Amino acid sequence: MVYALVLGTSAARLKSSSLFLPTKIMKVKINSKKNLKVNLSILVDKKTIQKKMDDKLIELKDKVQLKGFRPGKVPPQVIKNQFGKAIYGEVIDGLLKETSTKALEENKIKVAGQPKIDLKTFGEGKDLDYTMEVDILPDIKLKPLDKIKATSYEIEVEKELVEKRLKEIAKNQQNFSNKSSNQPSEKNDLIIFDYSAKVDGKDFEGNTGKNIQLVLGKDLFIKGFDQQLIGTKINQSKSVSVKLPENYPKKDLVNKQASFNCKILNIKKPIETKIDDEFGKKLGAKDLNDLKELIRKQIKNQYQNTLETITKRKILEQLDKDHDVDLPQNLVEQEIKLLTQNIKKDDLEKNKKENLKLAKSRIKTGLILNEIGVKNKLKVDESEIQGEIQKQLRSMPGQEKMVLEYYKNNQSAVASLRGALYEEKVVELIKNKIKLEKKNVNTKEAEEILKKISENTKSLKSSETKKDPKKQKTHKKKK
């Protein structure tokens, strides 16, 4: 997500680094600053490097074990002779990280990606001289938010819709009762049977089944199979002839005619599910009224979440329109990669302009939202991240360990989660500052709103296609 990307490269990240170097140990010069790129020269004197080397050798003295020396008694010079190159490399690596971070912080440079470092001079007895080029975040002049207009919807769920959904749930929770042995099976009955099958008079792997259950008329086993069992009775044997399907595991048997000898063990007729307090308890509610309330909330949330997404989109569109922002090219390229990572090569080329446009829009709104968050001192603390993870755990029973392991081993997922929470905070702040019209609508009105937006989106895409001659040619070819 772009917001996580922006947050991850902001000054907040720099402050988390260990910055203990005094300013005097390095000299920093800004060589150039243009097109959202900054080039700096950094010089670390050789005395500082030597001091770091000496400190590292003393630190290793108590850890290194060499033949002929007691533990902790290996002379620093011996350690240097044995491991000098590795120690020097570690020291230089640490100094590069520390000095580059310090240089960016002191010059208040907001980076937008990893710096490119070019070593000019280095080596034992020499100064460390290097240049660093970084992409930087643009300065954004925020426009007043009070001119933005949007509509927030409150959903009212009709009683009839709750009752309809309740009946659908009851239908899916259907129960059955045993039929007597002389009653033939009918459509919608549950039939239980064993079978053995043959193709061309021969057995084949997987040709038997025990206690198979089928609801007659649903055609869920093999096409045309259960229709032939209608009219059978308990303890009856019935021969069923069907063609094995295209997706049958044994490819050499696909589309072959198979003969199934079925022994009917039991037949059950459907009984209407009684919708009462016991039914509510069976589904985890306190009683029937509580179940209805849970259904009402579920329906409301489905519409509410979709309409809130539309409200947010309206806000972001106006933020995009109201601001002119120079975009770091590296962020745009990263966003395009994210957008197109699962897209085929042909589609990638065909939708190149749209992908670029979308990537720029997402980066731009991300930068604007980030700036609004910074100006208003918004933060996402660790407890909020853990709270969101716990919410996900509750919504995925049985998969808690997998979710925890995912976040534990995937820091980019945690960063993405932080970015999403930060974005929510910023959008809520904007809602409190803009002209937000609050509107109560029922689900039918909500459906009309969603339908209209969908039609407008299709119409817009169609008009864009007409303007693009390349796309017109593509459509003509398809015809």
Image (cartoon, grey):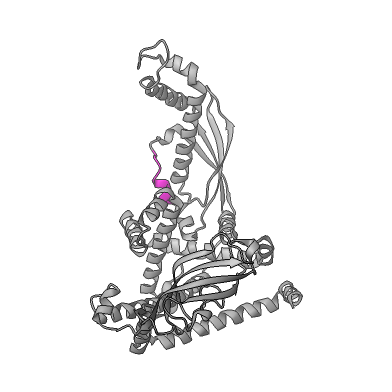
Residue ranking furthest to the top: 68
- The reply, left or right, for residue 456 in relation to residue 407 is right
Q: Is residue 14 magenta?
A: yes
Residue 258, placed above or below residue 389: below
Residue sitting at x 42%, y 24%: 51
Q: Residue at x 51, y 74 (%)?
A: 220
**In the image, is 251 to the left or to the right of 260?**
right
Q: Quadrant of residue 61?
A: top left
Q: How far across and how far down the image is residue 83, in percent?
A: 48, 21
Could you tell me which residue is drawn at 48 percent across and 40 percent down?
100
**Residue 294 located within the stretch drawn in magenta:** no
Q: Is 300 positioned to the left or the right of 261 in the image?
A: left
Q: Is residue 114 visible?
A: yes
| Quarter occupied by residue 311 | bottom left
Residue 404 screen position, x and y as percent: 37, 53
Q: Which quarter of the rendering shows the C terminus?
A: bottom right
Q: Give the number of marks.
A: 0
Percent from the top left, x then y, of residue 63?
A: 37, 22
Q: Which residues are magenta?
A: 11-19
Near-viewer residue (156 or 462): 156
Depth check: give the residue in front, 379 or 413: 413
